[in-house]
Amino acid sequence: MRLHQQRGRLIVRDLPALAWAGHAIFIVGGLLVIALTWAGSSDPSVYSLGLALGLTNILGGLYLMARHPASIVELNPDCGEVRVRRWSPGWKRSHWYSLAALAGVEVEYSERSGGAKRYRPSLRFGGSELVPVSQSWCRGRDACDVVAQRINGYLEGLGRGATWPPH
């Protein structure tokens, strides 16, 4: 995740390029299976099987990409909003939240079946709603802590407290 400030706004970008490259292997493999089956067989049953295998690989790669979308989170004190944009091949979504309702950032974790923990920074709105900064989980907590500390430091720098939101 990359953080930078631009005209008073804090922008957090997460582009899971390595994950997408790995998922693209399924798509390329599926296209290759379809091409080789089409070029090398005149038997309809072999062609049907190759087409089914190829399409399954392609759809699997697209599904995995959709589960790891790219994210941009923008904290904009001028309009008093937090904008969360996510996209992957084939879809795009944007959500807006009130900056005044943002209580802070914390690192949430999940345990995998083998007991290993995964982490990701999340925005805490009000007392309960958590909105992930990134949909991707990290194996180590350190990078997530840095992101959470930078965002919380930005919020403190805005003078949040008894006079927040500014009038």
Image: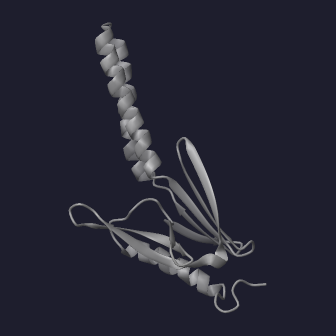
Residue reaching furthest left?
A: 114
Residue 38 point in image, percent of width and height: 37, 15
Q: Quadrant of the C terminus?
A: bottom right
- Does residue 41 appear in this view? no
Place residue 75 in its image quadrant. bottom right
Q: Position of residue 85 (x, y in %)?
A: 59, 57
Closer to the camera, 146 or 129?
Answer: 129
Q: Residue furthest bottom?
A: 162
The spot of residue 160 in percent (x, y) is 64, 87
Q: Residue furthest top?
A: 42
* Residue 144 appears anywhere in the view: yes
User: Which residue: 75% across, 74% down?
Assistant: 78
Q: Is residue 80 above or below residue 166?
A: above
- Residue at 42%, 42% in the rendered image: 63
Locate residue 92 relative to residue 69 in the image: left or right. right
Q: Position of residue 57 (x, y in %)?
A: 36, 33
**Colour logic:** one colour
Q: How many marks?
A: 0
Farthest residue, direction right: 167
Dividing the picture into quadrants, the one containing residue 125 is bottom right
Question: Residue at (42%, 59%) from the top-left corner?
Answer: 136
Does residue 18 appear left or right of residue 105 in this picture?
Answer: left
